[in-house]
Image (cartoon, rainbow, N blue to C red):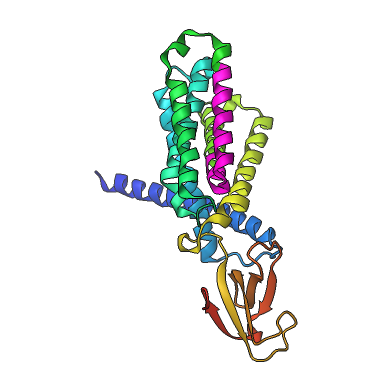
Amino acid sequence: MTEESFRTRIQLAASAIAVIGVVVYGIGFLVLTIHHASFGIPLIGFLRPRIISAGILFCAFAAIPVAVWLFAMKRNQPEAKKDLRDYLSVLVDFLLEALVISIITLRFIFVGFPEQSLRHYYGWATAAVFVSSAVWALPWWSKWGKVPHVVRFVGIYTWVAFCLYKAYDKTLALLVGWFLICAYMTYTARDALRNPNAVPIRGWIQDAMAGFGTVGFFALLLYPALPSAFLGGVPVPITFQFADKSMPIANSPQLKGWLLDETDDGFYFIQDKNAKKSVFIPRSDVIAVYYGEQK
């Protein structure tokens, strides 16, 4: 390798890192802005580590379904778009893979299990995977025409939706939905990147709107369920200590709540974990802050 070639590779690597950094920052800024806006929090700064962490979380959660979808598309040849049965096979394969990955891996990242027992939870989750797999794997279905394949496809998706409903776990259903949304985005982007000249302007606009919708889905539904240990948006228990009882929202020297974010000026928190509007306390009014549950 010559010196000029080595220098060229270094420049390309630096450019790629810069582009990736801008993309991660832009996504993180959108995620954090949308999440804060849902609580009525105004825009807080442009250069914050939490913006980068939100962007990294989005990219990490998007990379898993994108990789699985590309692998599923590679396994199914010829091109699924040319044959309806192949296309439906790709969609069902991806749904089953999304279920398994969501149950085994991603589910344990999020906060808490549903109020139902683990036996009830895993019973319906297992039924969603194995019953759907058994129905799809029956060999005599391959000899039937397109209409039975469509009926079987609709039946499997309906059964999975019913099982997720009976499991009473909103987070698991959101994860599966996230996988399917990312799969669709990957499929459309794959065709556009292969032949960008064949995509009309309206198609690019639709893809851009779908991209913003995907970011909004993550910011409003998945990011708030990620615990703070993974740099997510789950509110942190907090207790404020005041110098006196003059605070209008507190009748005692202490006030408990759930911290959403903090800046040099003060704290944004909610008094109830299910509240949708935040409260701001200036830092100058607080003499001490206790993080975590106070016994």
Q: Give the left or right position of residue 276, taking residue 73 as reference.
A: right
Q: Quadrant of the N terminus?
A: top left
Identity of the residue drawn at 56% across and 13% down: 148
Q: Position of residue 164 (x, y in %)?
A: 55, 39
Identity of the residue drawn at 41% across and 14% down: 139
Identity of the residue drawn at 65% across and 27% down: 200
Q: Quadrant of residue 256?
A: bottom right
Of residues 82 and 16, the one drawn nearer to the viewer in this rendering: 82
Give the main secondary structure of the magenta stretch.
helix
112 versus 170 height, above or below: below
270 versus 35 height, above or below: below
56 versus 196 height, above or below: below
Q: Quadrant of residue 207?
A: top right
- Residue 161 part of the magenta segment: yes
**Identity of the residue furthest to the left in this view:** 1
- Residue 266 part of the magenta segment: no
Q: Which residues are magenta?
A: 150-176
Q: Position of residue 79 (x, y in %)?
A: 47, 19
Q: Give the left or right position of residue 226, taking residue 242 as reference.
A: left
Of residues 61 and 235, the one drawn nearer to the viewer in this rendering: 235
